[in-house]
Amino acid sequence: MKSNIINSDTSTKAIILFSFIILKFLIQYSLILPEYDLQRDEYLHLDQANHLAWGYLSVPPVTSWISYIIKLLGNSVFWIKFFPALFGALTTVVVWKTIEEIGGNLFALILGASCVTFSVLFRLNTLYQPNSLDVLCWTLLYFFIIKYTRQQQLKWLYYAAITFAFGFLNKYNIAFAIIGLLPAFIISPERKIFLNKKLYFILALVFVLILPNLLWQYQNNFPVIHHMKELTDTQLVNVNRLDFIRSQFLFFPGTNIIILIGLYSLIRYEPFKKYRLLFWSFFITLGVFIFLKAKDYYAIGIYPIYFAFGSVYIAHLLEKKSLKILKPICIILAIASFIPMYLVAFPNRSPQYYITHKETFHKLGMLRWEDGKEYPLPQDFADMLGWKELAAKVDKAYLQINDPAQTLVLCDNYGQAGAINFYSKHGIHAVSFNADYINWFDLHKKYIHLIRVKNHSERNAELKETSPLFKKSVITDSVTNKYAREYGTTIFSFTFSNIDINQRIQKEINEEKNW
């Protein structure tokens, strides 16, 4: 009889968890209107599948591995959006398993899963970027730390090490989780682990796993340092620490209280005393992010695991008969808190809608871009427009030259190059001096024609500078979608060069890579 009850309970939990996963995918695929293209970064990540390596200027190698799988599956939008949705669903699964591990009942499981599923992860998982997998790796890392803390079995530290290494090869951001965990271990009773020789074998394992990427960095003069300096000079300089703190409360609107309750429970709830190191790691990691003026979304990976503690503690508090009525209310509020986010945080309305309701988005700070200025559309939304138009017009210019083997398509930025390569119907391999494309020039070909894609602000300067180098120069077209971030981007056609294009390109590559 008892066995049947346990089996029934397990079956019920499995059905509910599976329902959360299905719901996650169904909602995720409905959050972007078809009139939007992919986002700028997605094109770069997809193009990495054509240039597999142990590292890139923009990201570590894992994204390229996933891109290669997407390529094998046909490079359709369905599969491009599938993987971030999958990583989001798996994050919910890990939180669910954490709740089970720390003794949560069915109510705690549903509450925790609701908090994670109906949250900023829907926003994060709309784009094919390393961020979705990053959050999953943070959550899984904390999960294995919890397993180790509870069971004191070293195998969980091995799993944590593998998770960290894989997360590191996806995005270096996970290093901040370790920056928070190390001092937390030192000031907790778990510091005894540092006396265990096997710990250092585990650290050696991590080093071996990430070594290929470190060697790539060394062989390429550590471009990650150049990338971080460039990021600091162009983007992080505009980050305000108060804005960072304010943004943290917007990631999980309506359920922030459960994170805070989770943190409180680590101090006050006796069964959670053994996990107290996670209380300290939370504030250490967040403090480092604030000190370094990090982008707000870098910190998202910290939070999901604390929904597990908060949900279990709330379930404990509501065990009194008079308070049980609050259980469904808590779940409803957790789900309902997603509604305001659904209305403003996704490209599920036409661009004109955002123009019409400009004041709403201004108050929310969504019109402020990474350069610190305000624009008509949120940056990510504007970054999802105009790409198909650009690729089609470059295709047209490419055909007009009628000499593809000797025509170089050179763009101003990685978004332009990636979008052209993704949408081109004529196998164009556009390049740029920007991001990873600087390593993807094929200078074994002899070029005599140039299609130049330039930002609107440099239109006149480009004609003046480049026209003398060719026998014929003409502006063929430009991006006309006024809502696009690339609005006004101009396409130039330069034919029959008077100079050695390959030599000129190589010189500029050398100058650009002189970091």
Image (spheres, rainbow, N blue to C red):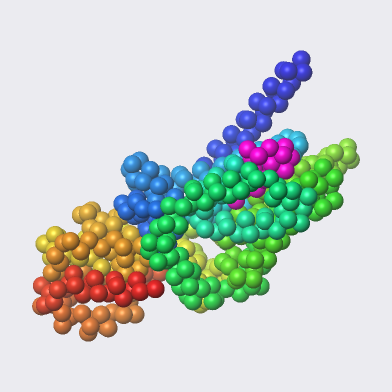
Comparing 435 with 321, the one in front is 435
Question: What residue is at 34 percent from the left and 45 percent from the top?
Answer: 71
Residue 478: in magenta span: no
Please tell me whether the stretch drawn in magenta is mainly helix, strand or loop: helix
Question: What residue is at 54 percent from the left and 46 percent from the top?
Answer: 205
Asked whether the viewer can see residue 118, the reply is: no
Quadrant of the rendered image containing residue 322: top right
Residue 226 at x, y = what percent? Answer: 44, 70
In the rendered view, tell whether residue 396 sits above or below residue 12.
Answer: below
Quadrant of the rendered image containing residue 186: bottom right
Task: Give the side of residue 362 with respect to residue 450, left or right.
Answer: right
Task: Give the side of residue 400 with respect to residue 72, left or right.
Answer: left
Screen quadrant of the C terminus: bottom left
Question: What residue is at 76 percent from the left and 15 percent from the top?
Answer: 1
Task: Give the side of residue 213 with respect to residue 143, left or right.
Answer: left
* Residues drawn in magenta: 138-156
Asked whether the viewer can see residue 280, the reply is: yes
Residue 46 at x, y = what percent? Answer: 37, 53
Question: What residue is at 15 percent from the left and 69 percent from the top?
Answer: 449
Residue 249 at x, y = what percent? Answer: 67, 62
Comparing 119 with 136, the one in front is 136
